[in-house]
Image (cartoon, grey):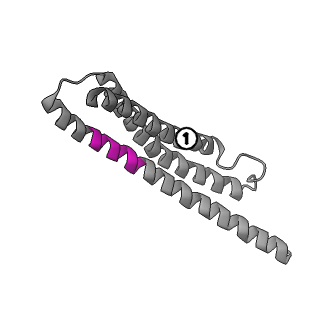
Amino acid sequence: MTEFEQQLFQYRASLLDLEQKMQASYDKAVMALSGGALGLSFTFLREVAKTTPLECTRCLLAAWACWGLSVTCVLFSFQTSAMALRKATEQADARLIYLEIVGGKYNTITKWLNHGGGALFFLGIVFIVIFMGVNML
């Protein structure tokens, strides 16, 4: 292996490591934000429900459902990510790593779950903003 190939290999390894760290940070952020949003909405509901009748409660329920599903997506993505890593290890051991999709279907599922978790978090924000807008005016 030439010096250039060694440097390229090390650079590639550092990129993969960085990708894993970034994904872990993303997952933690989605979990924390979705959980926090649920908690804040419960507090808001408790305070507002005391003084005024609520309107557009379906938006509140939709926000809760989105945040709950967001957390669920992230939790499942942890499992599918571990399965993808296991599959990638098997592919490397069988020398198939460059011939197949790394991690197989588990890698694809993990990506969809991660995107879904983020999208559901933002959709929950939209629903809670609508709910709060209707009830605060």
Tell me the magenta residue range.
31-41
Identified at 78% across, 69% down, the residue is 8
Three-letter code, disc 1: His
Name the side, left or right, on which 133 lies relative to 78.
left
**Residue farthest toward the left in the current orientation of the protein:** 50
**Residue farthest toward the right in the current orientation of the protein:** 2
Name the side, left or right, on which 87 lies relative to 78.
right
Say if 83 sits above or below 19 in the image. Answer: above
In the picture of the structure, the residue carrying the numbered disc 1 is 115
Identified at 44% across, 47% down, the residue is 30
Name the side, left or right, on which 14 lies relative to 129.
right
Identified at 22% across, 34% down, the residue is 45
Membership of 36 in magenta stretch? yes
Quadrant location of residue 94? bottom right
Q: How many marks?
A: 1
Between 124 and 86, the one lying in front of the other is 124
Quadrant location of residue 104? top right
Between 78 and 15, the one lying in front of the other is 15
Identified at 82% across, 71% down, the residue is 5
Provide residue 89's location: percent of width, then percent of height. Answer: 64, 56
Q: Quadrant of the C terminus?
A: top left
Name the side, left or right, on which 21 lies relative to 105.
left
Assign a secondary structure to mark 1. helix
